[in-house]
Structures are given as C-alpha cells and as structure tokens.
Image (tube, coloured by chain):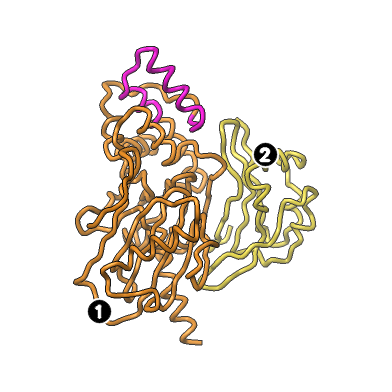
Amino acid sequence: MSVNAVKIHHGYSDGSGEYYVVIDAAACNGCGLCIAGCPQKVLELQTVMMDLEDKSVAAVKEEHRKKIKYTCSACKPEGQKTPCSRACKNKAVSVVWNKH
Amino acid sequence: MSQKGTAGFWRWEEYQRVFPERKKPGLVTAGVDVGSVGSKAAIMIDGEAYSWAVMRTGSNSPDSAKKVLDWALEGTGFSLADLQYTVGTGYGRVNVPMANKAITEIACHAKGANYIWGPTVRTVLDVGGQDIKAIRIDETGRVTSFLMNDKCAAGTGRGMEVFADLLQIPIEQIGEFSLKVDKEPEPVSCTCVAFAKTEAMGLLRNGWSKEKVLAAYTRAMALRMANLINRVGLEKELVITGGQSKNVGVVSRIETILNVKCLPAPNWREKGLDPMIAGALGAALLARALYLKTQAS
C-alpha cells in the first residue's frame, strides 16, 4: 500500500461476517482489466473526486453492493487471490472475506 | 436558532441558524447534503460557516434539497442567485437540482470533519440515518480509507428513533437514559431495525427495565460501529459525526470498546458547529475550492 492510498471499501459486514471489494482509488488507473477479469460482472467504472479532479476508477456496481457475499462467493476469496485482484497490474484491487 | 415543523419527540429537531456577525463581502458557496433521514444545507462565506439548516428529508429528494437550502438562506440577505457555487452530496445528491456539481460523501464528510475539529482528526465515524461510514483522513482532510455500510439500517440513527418511539423517550435523552444501568447488560443479539421492536418487547415482557433494554441495544450498536472503525483502522483523533454524535450512550460505549476518547462535539447549541452538518460543510468547502479552480483556469 502506498502512503497516499485511497482505499474505498465496497460491501458490508453483517451478522455472518465481513465482505468487501477494496479499490485503491489512488493506484487505480481505470484500465478496466479487473472489470474484464471478473466472471460475475460485478465491477464497473465510477467517478470519484480526488484532489478536486474527477477520476474514473473501478467500483462495485450499485446492484451488487449489498449482496457481494453471494455474488463474490463464486470466486471463494478465502485464502487465495481472486480473478479481479490478479487482473490488476497496479495492485489496486483486494478482497476482504472474513466469515465469522 | 429558529425552529419549525412538528417533529416528534423521537426524532431530532429541525432548526436553522445564522451568524449575522460573520457577514462580509466574499465568495458565497453552499453545500447541500440530502441524507436518507435528514437534509442539511450550509452556506459559507470565504470558507467560513455563515448559516445552516437541518430538516427531515421528505419522500421527494429534489423538494427536500430546495426546502433545506431555502431555509438556510432565510434571514441571511442572500438568495439562490447569490450562491456562486453549490455542491450536492449524500444519498439524494443526484436530486439536488440547483447544485453545480454532485460529489459522493467520500470527499465531503472528510472535509467537513477536518473543518469542525481541525487537522488532528484521523478517523471519522459518521452515523447517519440509514448508513454508517468509517473514514480515515490525513491532516488536510484527504481520505485514505473509506467504508460505507448501507446494507441495512441496523445500528444506525433510524434504529435509535424506533427505540425512542417504542420506549417513549425523547431522542435527545436516549443516550443518558441508556447509561442509567448499574451493570452493562449483554448486547442484544440482533440490531436489525425490523426485528428490534419484537426483541425489545420480549425483553420488556421478561421484566427488563427500559434502561436495561436500551443499554443492551445501544451496546450492540456501538459494537457494530467499532467493527467498522477497526476495518479502516483506528488512528487518533477519533470523531463522530451525524445524529448519533449527540447520543452520549453510543459515544461513551464506543470509547470503552475501542479504549479511546473521541474529540468532544462542539457546543452546537451555542456557537459551535453541529456534527450533523459535517457533510454539508464539506460540500460547501469543496464548492469554494472548485469555484476557485474554475476561475484560475
């Protein structure tokens, strides 16, 4: 993680555990490799404001944000790299997957 | 401080405030934060808070945005046409018709907390009406980590309102009420707002006092919030924004769980800035910065 990382957590924690796709908006260059690499088509580019500039970065689609526990379970992120994080050359994508 | 509306005892009061002594020639910007439960608007002159208003969000977001901004402008001598740049943020940000730009909460809340408490703030917990945000920022108010849990209203301000209504306790007193227990009870197992009433009724029927039920529920909420803070990583100073920053029961329990003291909320009833308007203040500050940027280019 670079010192200037801007980690945006997409997901939630509920009674069963915590589930997040984390995008480092500073490291993400909007190349879209993670979007293409995701078998569930969960990701898209969204605009965030960084240092007064609009920047297009990878993000979890609105319709998936509240159910990634189910959609992302297909990649079983426990203890292994997921297709989305492997696809990123800038190490901007990571997944948090802690089941209680 | 002027008030209006017939807000029930179970919800925060709607109010507006102007600081006439702060009026001066300068760049007038506005921030409008349309939340799921509350709408907030702040007017700034050269980056200093001049007036603001806090209202209930209605079923119609564009209408709420207009109403709360109109109220913030009341008695200021300014009209909509005097606003040189307006930023909309929050859950209903795309429905702020008068805004020059809509910006996600990510940047706005961080800037707002930095403005209210100053550069020592590193962690912000925003407990909104239907979501909870945990944010890490640097000394300039720039975000380094952001997490928003809006999957359900469990452990949010809305849950507290349900309890205030159920137990017939005014929302302003609910925090102190929850602390009136000799021994902290076990937290309730379920903070779900939909099931909270059923669970609370069951506990009351079993002979639990209102205070004990409230303590158990508040503790469960605080544990949930502390988990989110731990996910982004706690670094001092910690501040709490949103309606629950005024709930001493929530704040003191988070402090106990995390073993940290929050920076106290400013005395918002007197001259201080209301932690509830952090998002709107941040939006107004970004509005100023964006306006200056467009002028420079």
Residue B194 covered by magenta stretch: yes
Count the numbered circles shown: 2
Q: Chain A in the picture: what colour?
A: yellow
Q: Left or right: B295 with respect to B120?
A: right
The subunit letter for the residue under badge 1 reads: B
Q: Which residue is mark 2?
A: A69
Tell me: residue B121, above or below residue B234. Answer: below
Check disc 1 and report its element: helix, strand or loop: loop
**Going by the picture, which residue comes out furthest to the top?**
B206
* Residue B24 image label: 1
**Going by the picture, which residue comes out furthest to the front?**
B6
x 33%, y 22%: residue: B212
Please check whether the numbered discs 2 and 1 fall on a single chain: no
The span shown in magenta is B191-218
Residue B222 covered by magenta stretch: no
Hey, what amino acid is under mark 2?
Lys
Q: Left or right: B10 with respect to A59?
A: left
